[in-house]
Image (tube, rainbow, N blue to C red):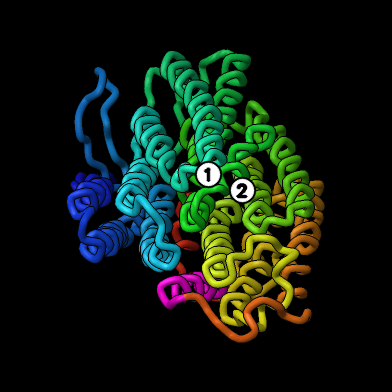
């Protein structure tokens, strides 16, 4: 049953209003930061209030305005959108707290622009999550592109400006391809509304046109997803402040692209049409290349944020792989990895930022003994690093378990070997950091010293959640419940 409610619109507007209030409070730091924390909490509570309704199998919708005849600006909250919305809004709270500590510690400039841009980017992300159709998604998708740009160039150095230009060139180019795909989809199906069974009218379209349409969607969303060879903007964007990198990798830009690809597979083409056209397997092989090659690139990076960036490029393709398998366990593993990767990777970036605030070190080769000097920070780092490798009891193990089961269900054992090889490569670029941090002699600080509590507490929380998401029983894990509900809705 579809229930009409203004809640989806309110969830989007909260952070937009926050951006306005942040600008108005630009001369009063404490008030400006208070607006950010308050808005993030209110947004999260609004979104969480919709969880019981969606878990009962209902959807929540709200039409704002008609853009064109039969094409409204409309929100629709289903299990998949709510999954992404809960994740993004919760991590905004923690990132806002972390940002306050980070910005104050380094006495960063343009703080008002920073917090306002963050708020608009979260509004865009929630808009993407709750979009009822492709045109609404596209509007917020491009809104996200422009709201993140000031964050990428925040330092205003020549390197930052060049990174910003590269970011815009890549992402806007992907947006043009996406718009072309949306126009073609409308011409073939006569609708842009997401459906649990896909656009049924597409079944009547020529096979060759559908194949072209699918490629256009994958390229359009794949740029933001950093699928190789469309990935190079992401490592370059690591020039941004660490909180930006953290949220960008966890839920904002790259996860928006992943969200779009999964929407296309199951809510535009639909499970039956994907199977009939045989589109899932080629996509799975395509992203397997990214999974392995990006991990190999990560091995060569001495800059910690760059190593984490290439790790993200690899890990994101796990999600697409799971969706492309077109099996229950594959989709479950892929969707769960959206949340699992978010908590683990945001922790690693939070730790990288904490290390920089305390020591101003950015290179892996400079971090010998850092675990003895910053034990809590490196304990959190170690937990989430082994989680991304796939070692229990951290959330990454659960994702990879279901992805492997999904590969077996699809009778594609090759992808199990891809996941195993990826795990070995993950171990090769993460374990040396952990070993050197705890088992080599420290130098630099000469004693224990953690980052300020505003920085330390969020990374401890996200590390703990990364464990809970693996060991929590299914009935107490709303992410797991929503992920299961997604498959039930599309079959």
Looking at the rendered structure, the secondary structure element under dot 2 is helix
Q: Quadrant of residue 353?
A: bottom right
The x, y position of residue 358, in whole percent, is 54, 72
145 in relation to 302, above or below: above
Q: Residue at x 40, y 73 (%)?
A: 454
Looking at the rendered structure, the secondary structure element under dot 1 is helix
Q: In the image, is 302 to the left or to the right of 474?
A: right
Q: Nearer the viewer, residue 261 or 489?
A: 261
- Label for residue 316? 2
Q: Nearer the viewer, residue 165 or 488?
A: 165
- Label for residue 254? 1
* Number of callouts: 2
Which residue in the rendered view is the most extreme toward the bottom?
Answer: 447
Label 2 neighbourhood size at 10 Å, few (<14), some (14-19), many (20+)?
Answer: many
Res. 194 visible in picture:
no
Label 1 neighbourhood size at 10 Å, few (<14), some (14-19), many (20+)?
Answer: many
**Segment tinted magenta in the rendering:** 452-469
Res. 311 visible in picture:
yes
- Label for residue 436? none
Name the mark nearer the viewer: 1 or 2. Answer: 1
Image marks 1 and 2: residues in contact by CB distance under 8 Å: yes
Q: Is residue 388 magenta?
A: no
The x, y position of residue 479, in whole percent, is 46, 62
> Majority secondary structure of the magenta segment?
helix
Q: In the image, is 465 to the left or to the right of 375?
A: left
291 in relation to 167, above or below: below
């Amino acid at each position: 049953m579809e229930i009409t409610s203004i809640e989806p619109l309110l969830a989007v507007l909260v952070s937009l209003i926050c951006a306005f209030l942040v600008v108005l409070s630009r001369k009063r730091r404490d008030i400006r930061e208070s607006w950010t924390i308050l808005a993030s909490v209110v947004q999260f509570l609004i979104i969480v209030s919709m969880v019981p309704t969606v878990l009962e199998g209902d959807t929540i919708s709200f039409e704002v305005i008609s853009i064109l005849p039969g094409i409204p600006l409309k929100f629709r909250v289903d299990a998949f959108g709510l999954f992404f919305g809960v994740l993004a809004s919760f991590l905004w709270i923690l990132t806002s707290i972390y940002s306050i500590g980070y910005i104050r510690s380094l006495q960063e400039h343009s703080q008002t622009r920073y917090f306002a841009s963050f708020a608009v980017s979260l509004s865009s992300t929630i808009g993407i999550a709750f979009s009822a159709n492709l045109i609404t998604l596209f509007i917020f998708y491009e809104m996200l592109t422009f709201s993140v740009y000031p964050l990428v160039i925040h330092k205003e150095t020549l390197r930052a400006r060049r990174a910003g230009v590269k970011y815009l060139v890549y992402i806007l180019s992907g947006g043009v391809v996406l718009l072309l795909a949306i126009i073609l989809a409308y011409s073939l199906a006569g609708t842009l509304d997401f459906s649990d069974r896909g656009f049924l009218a597409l079944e009547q379209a020529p096979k060759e046109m559908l194949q072209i349409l699918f490629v256009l969607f994958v390229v359009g969303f794949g740029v933001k997803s950093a699928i190789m060879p469309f990935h190079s903007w992401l490592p370059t964007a690591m020039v941004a402040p660490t909180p930006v990198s953290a949220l960008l990798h966890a839920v904002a830009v790259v996860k928006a692209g992943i969200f779009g690809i999964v929407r296309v597979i199951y809510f535009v083409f639909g499970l039956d049409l994907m199977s009939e056209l045989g589109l899932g397997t080629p996509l799975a092989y395509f992203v397997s290349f990214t999974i392995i090659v990006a991990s190999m690139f990560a091995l060569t990076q001495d800059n910690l944020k760059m190593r984490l960036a290439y790790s993200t490029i690899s890990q994101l393709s796990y999600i697409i792989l799971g969706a492309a398998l077109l099996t229950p366990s594959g989709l479950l593993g892929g969707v769960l990895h959206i949340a699992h990767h978010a908590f683990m990777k945001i922790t690693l970036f939070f730790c990288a930022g904490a290390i920089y605030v305390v020591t101003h070190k950015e290179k892996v080769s400079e971090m010998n003994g850092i675990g003895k000097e910053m034990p809590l920070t490196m304990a959190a780092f170690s937990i989430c690093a082994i989680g991304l490798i796939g070692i229990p009891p951290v959330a990454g193990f659960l994702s990879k378990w279901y992805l492997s089961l999904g590969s077996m269900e699809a009778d594609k054992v090759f992808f199990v070997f891809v996941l195993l090889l990826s795990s070995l490569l993950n171990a090769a670029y993460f374990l040396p950091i952990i070993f050197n941090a705890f088992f080599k002699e420290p130098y630099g600080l000469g004693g224990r010293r953690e980052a300020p509590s505003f920085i330390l507490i969020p990374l401890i929380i996200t590390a703990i959640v990364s464990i809970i998401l693996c060991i929590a029983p299914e009935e107490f894990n709303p992410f797991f419940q929503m992920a299961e509900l997604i498959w039930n809705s599309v079959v």
